[in-house]
Image (cartoon, rainbow, N blue to C red):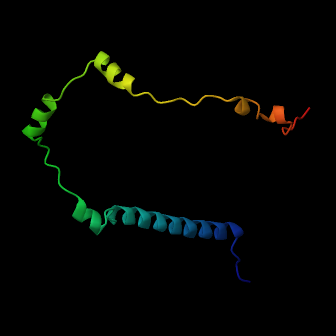
Amino acid sequence: MKPTRTISSYVLLIGVLGLSIVGGVLAFQIYSAAVKNQTTTEQTIAIKPIDGSIDQKVIDNLSKRTVYTEAEMAVVLGAVTTPTPEATQAAVTTSPEATGSGTTTQ
């Protein structure tokens, strides 16, 4: 009579094979992410290197700018007023309670 395998050996075999497949897929994903280039050729052409230096002309222009006080800004901004919408009587009475279209649950 031939000896038969127990069911636990089959479970162990399936578990080891499944774990090796998952490990292989995980290793491939890690390798793929490490090797993959994130920038396209158009982006590589458009990217300009940053040298880290600031042009002195820009600093001079910033120092020559006019600084306004709050009072001067209030005068300038006070001249420009934006109209605010006002609530009309029709807008107030169009609530669902006033028209009877609202449903009430008790």
Identify which residue is drawn at 31% across, 64% down. 37
Farthest-out residue, bottom? 1
- In the rendered view, does 85 fall on the left or right side of 79? right
Q: Which residue occupies the foreground of this view, 92 or 96?
A: 92
Q: Which residue occupies the foreground of this view, 51 or 10?
A: 51
Q: Which residue occupies the foreground of this view, 90 or 66?
A: 90
Q: Which image quarter holds the C terminus?
A: top right
Farthest-out residue, right? 106
Q: Is residue 101 above or below residue 13?
A: above
Q: Is residue 97 above or below residue 68?
A: below
Q: Which image quarter holds the N terminus?
A: bottom right
Percent across and percent down for residue 38 are 33, 62
Percent across and percent down for residue 7 are 71, 69
Identify which residue is drawn at 57% across, 31% down. 85
Q: Is residue 21 above or below residue 102?
A: below
Q: Quadrant of residue 27?
A: bottom left
Q: Quadrant of residue 5?
A: bottom right
Q: Quadrant of residue 95?
A: top right
Q: Is residue 24 above or below residue 89?
A: below
